[in-house]
Image (tube, rainbow, N blue to C red):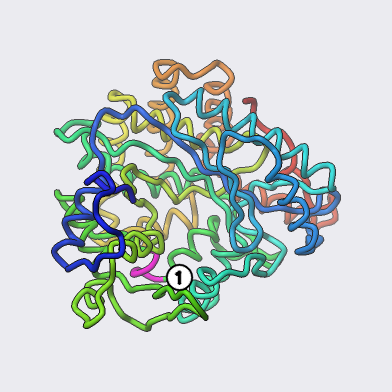
Amino acid sequence: MPDPSGGCADPRTAVTEAEVEALVRGICFKTGPPRRLGVEVEWLVHELRDPRLPVSPERLEAVYAALRTVPLRSALTVEPGGQLELSSPPAASLMECVGTVSADLDAVRAVLRRDGLAIVGLGHDPWHTPRRFLRAPRYDAMEACLDRTGPAGRAMMCTSASVQVCLDAGYEEPGPLGHVRRWWLAHQLGAVLVAAFANSPIAGGRPTGWLSTRQLRWAQIGTGRAGGPVLDADPRGAWARHVLDSPVMCVRRDDGPWHVPDGLTFREWTRSPRPPTRDDLDYHATTLFPPVRPRGHLELRMIDAQPGDDGWIVPLAVAAALFDDPEAAETAYRAVKPLAERAHGMPAPHNPLWRDAARVGLADPELREVAAACFAAALRALPRLGATTEVVDAVGAYRDRHVARGRCPADDSLDELRAAARGAHPLPQRTHGKDTPS
């Protein structure tokens, strides 16, 4: 988190409970006109000739070493299971963001292709069991912590991938672009985005019964680590309390394994004889994984990775339109309001609305109706945001193929799996193809 004091405070200085609340309130919602947009695209890395074959750690290490020599505008990082992630720089427009990431992805794919590998857009690996590629104290501690709630943590770390859209927090004042409205909208619309873009129905080669198995895994991790706060009229206060009352994942050490406390909240840590530092607070915030995370901007973390070379562009464009165009934002707000009752006041994603979205997607009639209204609003707004005809057409094609029919990419995967079981054709390679234009 950036320091609002200009970096004068020593990050090694211990912080009190009151100081933590003040710091979080001041840092996590940077208000102002929505001017910047970003996207983080995560990908599974599979064998180009057959995605069911495992990729050895040695091959991953070699190809990532080669990728680090490639000049990219986006930041390239590796997830614990070897998934590849590109994080765009903040862009001044949708098309700037699309252009930057598309060019970087072309360069990445060329390097991978030379080694017979491909990046694949799936929210959860349908064939491989979790296997950790990165060995570092952070991930050792994360694994030990998440193992306490079952196997979902390892699946999240090693076999999941997403499209994360980053948006400005919004204006200080009320209105469709105000930060209070945008925070609320993100949590209601988030369920619609889960349903519309669900793309992870298979694990271990078999259907899981959920269209977004990735979202199921997040819910299984638990409320303290992967849940959001209760929504109220003060997002800053709600998030500050959530940060304080969430369990500490680890206490870092210079030597040896990091300590993984059991059940210690950050609030309790501030009251201990050896309280945390400002640096510990900054680190603690990175170990919380709610579906909407405020980091000075808003991270929408609920969207499964999408099929095709350019499938990620559609959720990015839809989210940008519904949040940053005032008319579309107002339409989306009115469309999702009835959904709020289905959450029963419970935080996302641990409420009935989000569970229904992840399990059945747009087969839910109400979610389908709201998604149709939101896609229509997005399509009207995108030209006002400077979107090219190709991007507008991609969103329109997605609406026609999926939303209008009450479907999502997960339904396509299940159809293909059933066809393969009947011997109609081999397991698909569609995730390597170019489904939508850039």
Badge 1: how crowded within 10 Å, few (<14), some, or many (20+)?
A: some
Decide if residue 177 is on the left or right side of residue 430: left
Q: Nearer the viewer, residue 186 or 94?
A: 94
**Residue 421 visible somewhere in the drawing:** no
Q: Residue type at mark 1? A: Gln
Q: Nearer the viewer, residue 231 or 267?
A: 267
For the point 35% across and 73% down, the residue is 248
Tell me where the magenta segment starts and ends, as one range: 222-226
Task: Look at the picture and state if 131 lies above or below 353.
Answer: below
* Residue at (56, 37) in percent of width and height: 74
Near-viewer residue (73 or 361):
73
Image x and y of residue 374, in percent: 39, 33
Q: Is residue 326 above or below residue 58?
A: above
Residue 305: x and y in percent read 57, 47
Is 386 inside the magenta-drawn segment?
Answer: no
The image quadrant where one finds the C terminus is top right
Query: Which residue is at the front of the view, 373 or 60?
Result: 60
Quick check: can you spot residue 322?
yes
Question: Where, by quadrant of the figure, is residue 310 drawn?
Answer: top right
The quarter of the picture where residue 296 lies is top left
Q: Main secondary structure of the magenta part?
A: helix
Question: SS for tag 1?
Answer: helix
Give x and y (percent) for residue 92.
42, 25
**What is the x, y in percent for residue 54?**
79, 63
Residue at image point 37% right, 83% down: 262
Q: Viewed as shown, does residue 407 lie left or right of 44?
A: left
Q: Which residue is mark 1?
A: 220
Q: Residue at x 17, y 35 (%)?
A: 172
